[in-house]
Image (spheres, rainbow, N blue to C red):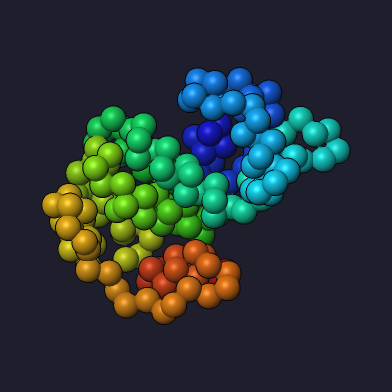
């Protein structure tokens, strides 16, 4: 989470910090071994082997998005987070990809989302979604939003879906 708060993109965490934080959330250190050795979702950064990172940035983005949905207590905190994302030193594409994951998490975890339609509209604007007011209204009313027609997922999965959400011309690097 340290990287999320500073850069709004996937990064690394100190192994000891992760191990200390697991019990605070009712998890055991064995979970880290499972994630790394068996599922291979997390990997140790060599040569020092003191830090960990997600093996897939999209997993990191969605887990961070879920964390935000459950942790940010009100609209003020959401706007503070979005202001930090706007000021991030990370590439615009990286931040937009992360914010697309956050928006998906807000949409799918709407019972835990504590922001307003203004927060959702700002997220939608950041990721280039057309007709943001329809999606924001649907999330806040707990109905299914009218999504733009999407192609079936490609073998590369979620990143293709995020590209489909961006406005035309925003795909320079993707």
Q: Which residue appears at 21% of the width and 53% of the height?
A: 139
User: Residue 135 lies in what quarter of the image?
Assistant: bottom left
> Which percent across, then down, holds residue 167?
37, 71
Counting every numbered tag in the picture gives 0
In the picture shown, does residue 102 fall above or below 145? above
- In the picture provided, is 33 more to the left or to the right than 24? right
Q: Which residue appears at 39% of the width and 38% of the height?
A: 68
In the picture shown, does residue 29 fall above or below 84? above
Q: Nearer the viewer, residue 14 or 171?
A: 14
In the picture shown, does residue 27 fall above or below 126? above
> Which percent across, then down, holds residue 67?
42, 37
- In the picture provided, is 43 more to the left or to the right than 94? right
Q: Nearer the viewer, residue 74 or 89?
A: 74
> Which percent across, then down, holds residue 35?
64, 42
- In the picture provided, is 34 more to the left or to the right than 90? right
> Which percent across, then down, holds residue 116?
20, 44
Question: In which quadrant is the C terminus drawn?
Answer: bottom right
In the picture shown, does residue 95 fall above or below 6? below
């Amino acid at each position: 989470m340290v990287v999320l708060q500073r850069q709004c993109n996937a990064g690394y965490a100190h192994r000891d910090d992760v191990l200390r934080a697991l019990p605070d959330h009712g998890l055991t250190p064995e979970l880290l071994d499972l994630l790394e050795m068996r599922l291979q979702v997390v990997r140790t950064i060599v040569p020092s082997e003191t830090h960990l990172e997600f093996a897939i940035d999209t997993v990191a983005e969605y887990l961070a998005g879920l964390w935000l949905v459950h942790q940010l207590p009100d609209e003020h905190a959401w706007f503070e987070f979005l202001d930090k994302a706007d000021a991030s030193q990370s590439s615009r594409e990286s931040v937009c990809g992360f914010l697309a994951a956050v928006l998906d998490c807000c949409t799918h975890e709407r019972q835990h989302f504590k922001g307003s339609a203004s927060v959702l509209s700002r997220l939608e604007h950041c990721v280039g979604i057309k007709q943001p007011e329809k999606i924001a209204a649907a999330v806040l009313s707990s109905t299914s939003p009218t999504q733009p027609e999407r192609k079936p997922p490609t073998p590369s999965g979620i990143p293709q879906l995020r590209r489909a959400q961006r406005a035309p011309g925003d795909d320079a690097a993707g």
